[in-house]
Image (cartoon, rainbow, N blue to C red):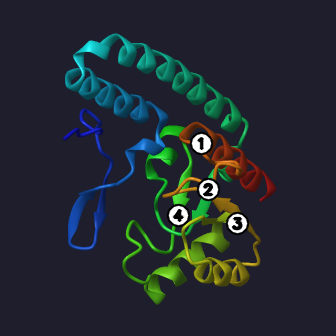
Amino acid sequence: MVVASHGITPIETAEPGAVAPVPDPWRDVENTQSYAANIAQALREADPERADDFRRGLDRYRAELETLDRELRAELAGIPPAKRRVITTHDAFAYYGHAYDLTFLAPEGLSTDSEPSAEGIAKLIRQIRREGIKALFLENVSDPRLMEALAHEVSARLGPPLFSDALSRADEPASNYVKMMRYNTATLKEGMLKN
């Protein structure tokens, strides 16, 4: 067994009744480098004869991830602070927001297991109107009805789906981690700059 997230400092959130670590630290590219290192180490231990191959593979992937991180930061750098707010279906992008200085708001919070409360949605609608947020996005694995109703209520258009908990098919724009991160970043940037 390999704990791919070993060594990553989790972001914590106060959910009703408890403080809990936020899932999906891999949305921060720096954390993904830790995942890759932990997996490569486990592979070296499991197959010592190929340790050099795993080390070289890790070095190549780390270089790709370092380039990706620089690209994402450059892509988002020109967005003014007032426009760096996004509404998504559920709060799946906390690590991405933390890494790239964006604020994500969501009617469903961290869990998609329960329906959001009417009070929570009303509070989010007031915040959207007060702050003039127009960047609303579905996630590729979410039921669109809540976000469609929210967009209608605040007179906003939904942007293209973000890839959150599943990659796209091989012939689509988010077929691996690096492509997904580039696609989501470009999509988010376009949506934030439109508002």
Q: Which of 69 and 140 is in front in this view?
A: 140
Q: Residue at the location (69% across, 84% down)? A: 153
Q: Which mark is residue 181?
A: 1
Is the residue under label 2 in contact with that under label 4 (CB below 8 Å)?
yes
Q: On the image, numbered disc 3 is attached to which residue?
A: 132
The CA span between labels 4 and 1 is: 19 Å
Q: Marks 4 and 3, Cα distance to the nearest angstrom? A: 13 Å
- Classify 10 Å Cα crowding around label 2: few (below 14), some (14-19), many (20 and above): many
The residue tagged with tag 2: helix, strand or loop? strand
- Of labels 4 and 2, earlier in sequence is 2
Front residue (pair 101, 144): 144
Residue underneath mark 4: 105
Q: Spatial distance from mark 4 to mark 2, Cα to Cα?
A: 8 Å
Q: Mark 2 points at which residue?
A: 85
Mark positioned earlier in the residue sequence (1 or 2): 2
User: Between marks 3 and 2, how big is the CA–CA gap?
Assistant: 9 Å
Element marked by disc 3 = loop
